[in-house]
Structure formats: structure tokens, C-alpha cells
Image (tube, rainbow, N blue to C red):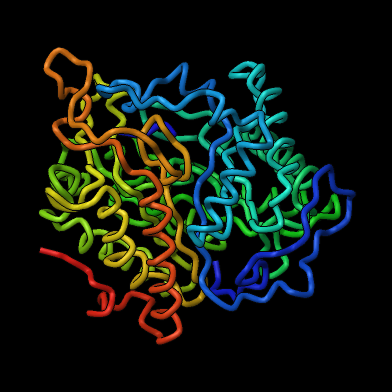
Amino acid sequence: MVALTAVAVAVVGATSSLGAGAGAGAASKTESSPSAHDGLTRPLVGAYYYMWNPENLIAGGSLRQQLVPSQRPPFGLIDSNKTSTATRDIANAHKAGINFFAIDWWPYDPAFSGRNYLTADAAMKEFLAAPDLPEMKFAMFYETWNLGFDAGNESTPVSEQAELHFDSDMLALAKDYFSNPSYLHIEGRPVVYLYLTRTLTGDVAGMIGGARTYLEQHGYADPFFVGDEVYWRVTPQIQVPNAPVFTGQPQLGRIDQFDAVTSYTLYYGDPQQENGPASDSTGYPGTTHIAADQRLLLTLYRNATDNKVPVLPVVQPGFNDRGFRLTTDHPTQPRQWLAGDGPSSTLDQMLRCVAIPEVDPALPIVMVTSWDDWNEDTGVEPIPGTPTTKDDSTSGTAYTQGYQYGGEGTSEVHTIAQDVTLLDRAYARGETGGSSPSPALGCQEP
């Protein structure tokens, strides 16, 4: 991803095992409906999933290929145009207790990256052909900002053209994916994640409401939209000349259009402390107030709507985009919670200290960023390699900033699996929904 410097519901769209039948191909113009086994019996864990490899890794680069020794994965093992890749990923995610993938999908725009859509469409067909797809659910993760992002104002203005584009894309998703037996539904409604809605300005209600009406007119169920709204600083929905570009206040005019809100990432690498807790992204996370600050932010968003719009917590194993965009000089968020800790300790502590106590009882879903984003090194998929702090820069640490990478193996998979057990227990005991981490969670905060 590019890093940029509703009502409470009962869930009936996924089971504890998410074992609906597999299927592929376009849907007919009929409203999709959940199976008879779509009752939720436990919280769900979803992971953002990308099918742009190896093309994106070749074009963008990553920390891993700068390491000494290099840990760039063999392209054949991450080829998104192979059913075997999806089959392996689904199997590993299932072992981790991840219930669904939110699959990245860019708005169709031939002028922007038209050729790439042929590749993306082919990759999606390969994913749907995976024989173990019944073990997982999936939802589409729509790149809303590509409707016309204005980098200078960090805004995506809602125009008539953008609304028409959005309607067309939602109809395409409905036709191709919503009726697939493995598509994630909530209350019988197909789930669609929307990236960077926190940059939308203008008539957001018209855009989202219009898409709902448009799909209903074509015989499809009203989508369950999850907006990417939760962040330290967001773009005001109504932009005023000479006013600040950002605000720290939740934008209720946007939030009210969604059925739930979340964040793609709460990493904050901007050096301007007044816009967010920059100190939380500097040094080992266990020496900062990152967990407490994130809990406070999630509370802010819950309180803004009086708990009417569920807020979904998100975790990640660390962050390092220096192999992708070194000149931005974003600080590394290491995968080790404290010096000497294991390679999945940051992920473990963020699950224990933030996600589990903050999971919303009205919509108990935890998001993981990400399964396989190599550009920002947020992937939790099994990663081979030799532990090292060295890279191929002149200083030997320009990319790693002296932190250790390599040797993670399946540690993140095992960590998520054990913490999902803790999540289930905490949810069953009612120890979620903005409560302080219980001693049983083993949260290690300063």
C-alpha cells in the first residue's frame, strides 16, 4: 500500500470454521444470500491480501532484497497468477486462525494502470480456483483513493464522475464475486472494505448511498461497507480555504455512511508530533506508549458515534518501507517488542494489548495488516531467511536501522493462532469492548 504523510449489528455472514462451499465465476443478477450455517459463534480475524506479486515487488522493491544475505523470495513462490500460491496462503492462514482475506482491488482506470487489470483479473481467477477455498472467506478491499486523489490536500474529492465510477465498480464486484459461496457476508450483506475513506471530501453520503441504491436496482444486496476512517489525523470532509489540511477529530459525516470503520494501519511515521504520536513509531514498541495510545484512539472513534458504528481494531507485525521509499526516511517499527525478543513479539503484544481488549462486541472482527505486503514489510506469511541486522547500503544499516530481520519462519502464524485462542476466551468472558487488558492476556506495557 502507499503510506500517506452505522449501526451495531449481529453477524450472520460467517461461521466459526467458515466452511461454506467453494465456487468461482460470475454471479447472476440475484441478491446473494448466506447459507444456513452463517451464524457467528466466535470473533473473526481477517488479513489484507495482495495479488500483485511478483510485479509489484519487482517495480517497488523491499527491505528484504536489501538485506545481507538477501531475503527476496523466489518469484515463483509468490506468483499471484498461480493457484498453488493461493492454495498455500489459504492453508497457512487457516493454521493461523485467520478466517478471511480482504483482497486488494483497484478501481478500473485504463489511463492509470489499464494493463495491470488483465493481470489482476487473472490472479483473482487463480485465487478462486484454489481447492481449499472452502476453508476461507474473502471480501474485496477497494482502493477508493484511486478515484481522484489530490496529494497536495491529501483528499479524494467526491465528484459526479467519481460517483459514477464507484457505482460501476461496485456493480462489477457484485456480478463477479458477491454470490461466490466463500464471499464474506454480514447480516446477509456482502462485505466491502474501502481504503482511505478518511481522505474523501464533499458529498460522501451521496456517493455511498448512491452505490447502495444502484446495486439494489440491479438486484444485489446492500453492501456492508467498512470504511478506513480511524487514524491520528484525517482529512476534513468539508474543506475550508486557509483552514488546516488535517484534523484529529472523527468526521461523523463520513463515518455515518459506513456499517463499520477501521484503519488499514495506525503506524505514524510523520515527524510532526502535533498530528500524531510520532514517538510511538521510534524505537522498540515496548519502550513507547503505542498500545495505550491506540486504545485511546479507538475509544475516541467509538465515543464519537455513541457506539452506533462498530470500530474494528487492526494489528501489524511491524513496519519498514525503507527498501521501497528510503528517501521519505520513515522510522522503522521493528518486529521485536523489546531488544532480544522474538521476531513476532510486536504482533503478539499488539494483539494482547490492543486488539483483544478493544474488539467490538457488536461486530467482533480483528484485522491484520497484512498477509503479504513486502513493500512495507507488514506481511505475516511465513518468511524464510537468516537473522541479520545488515543491509547492502554504504552504512550497512540504512534499511534495517540496526534492527533484526530474517528467521521469522512461521512464528507469526503460530503467534496469531495462540492469540486467537485468547481472543475467543476474552470474548466469551465479556472482557472486550474497550476494557483494559486483563492479566490473563500477558500484555507487557511500560
* Percent of width and height locating residue 135: 66, 58
Q: Give the total number of marks visible in the rendering.
A: 0
Q: Residue at x 24, y 19 (%)?
A: 327
For this view, does 198 lie left or right of residue 189? Answer: left
For this view, does 2 lie left or right of residue 15? Answer: left
Q: Is residue 355 above or below residue 172?
A: below
Q: Nearer the viewer, residue 3 or 284?
A: 284
Q: Residue at x 24, y 36 (%)?
A: 387
For this view, does 103 lie left or right of residue 215? Answer: left
Q: Is residue 103 visible?
A: yes
Q: Is residue 321 above or below residue 88?
A: above
* Percent of width and height locating residue 20: 74, 63
* Percent of width and height locating residue 51: 58, 34
Q: Nearer the viewer, residue 347 or 169?
A: 347
Q: Nearer the viewer, residue 168 or 45?
A: 45
Residue extending farthest to the bottom is 429
